[in-house]
């Protein structure tokens, strides 16, 4: 039997009951890395700043070190960056995703 629509595989990693890391949160981390802003990352993904910030806080709480660091706006402006841990988590997730989806 051949399905009308081929199956899709999406990787989701569960960290206890506190966090599920999947393609959406990985994309949010990528947008934060590229835009340097949580609000801009949220806009690019069609979500509110509040939702994007909530997801960042959820990810930061689930790891020993934060994945994203942010600074409030002001004279020098605000912004957000991936920490070394955040960059490593993102890279490892994407590598595992590629491995799983390849075969």
Image (cartoon, helix red, strand yellow):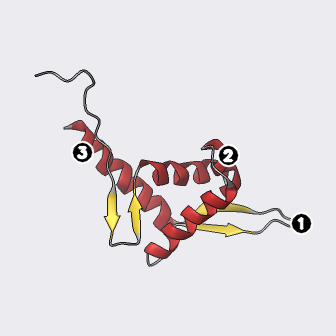
> Residue visible at 36% across and 56% down?
92
Closer to the N terminus: mark 1 or mark 2?
Answer: 2
Mark 3 vs mark 2: give the one in front: 2
What count of labels does the image hold? 3
Q: Is residue 37 visible from the viewing direction of this image?
A: no
Answer whether labels 3 and 2 touch (C-beta < 8 Å): no
Closer to the N terminus: mark 3 or mark 1?
Answer: 1
Q: Quadrant of the C terminus?
A: top left
**Secondary structure of residue under mark 2:** helix
Residue 95, numbered label: none
Q: Is residue 73 left or right of residue 99?
A: right
> Residue visible at 31% across and 49% down?
11
Closer to the N terminus: mark 3 or mark 2?
Answer: 2
Spot occupied by residue 73 in the image (x, y as percentages of width and height): 81, 65
**Secondary structure of residue under mark 3:** helix
Nearer to the camera, 70 or 55: 55
Spot occupied by residue 9 in the image (x, y as percentages of width and height): 28, 40
Query: How busy is the neighbourhood of tag 2: few (under 14 within 10 Å), some, or many (20 plus)?
Result: some
Q: Which residue is mark 1?
A: 75
Q: Which residue is mark 3?
A: 100
Answer whether labels 1 and 2 touch (C-beta < 8 Å): no
Q: Is residue 31 visible from the viewing direction of this image?
A: yes
Mark 3 vs mark 1: give the one in front: 3
Query: How busy is the neighbourhood of tag 3: few (under 14 within 10 Å), some, or many (20 plus)?
Result: few
Spot occupied by residue 48 in the image (x, y as percentages of width and height): 67, 53
> Residue visible at 50% across and 48% down?
27
Q: Residue furthest right?
A: 75
Spot occupied by residue 78 in the image (x, y as percentages of width and height): 77, 63
Q: Which residue is mark 2?
A: 43
**Secondary structure of residue under mark 1:** loop
Q: Quadrant of the N terminus?
A: top left
């Amino acid at each position: 039997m051949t399905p009308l629509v081929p199956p899709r595989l999406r990787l989701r990693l569960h960290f206890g009951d506190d966090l599920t890391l999947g393609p959406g949160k990985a994309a949010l981390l990528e947008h934060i890395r590229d835009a340097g802003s949580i609000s801009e990352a949220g806009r690019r993904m069609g979500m509110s700043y509040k939702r994007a910030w909530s997801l960042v806080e959820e990810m930061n709480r689930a790891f020993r070190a934060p994945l994203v660091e942010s600074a409030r706006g002001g004279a020098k402006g605000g912004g957000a960056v991936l920490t070394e841990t955040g960059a490593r988590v993102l890279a490892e997730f994407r590598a595992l995703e590629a491995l799983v989806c390849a075969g």
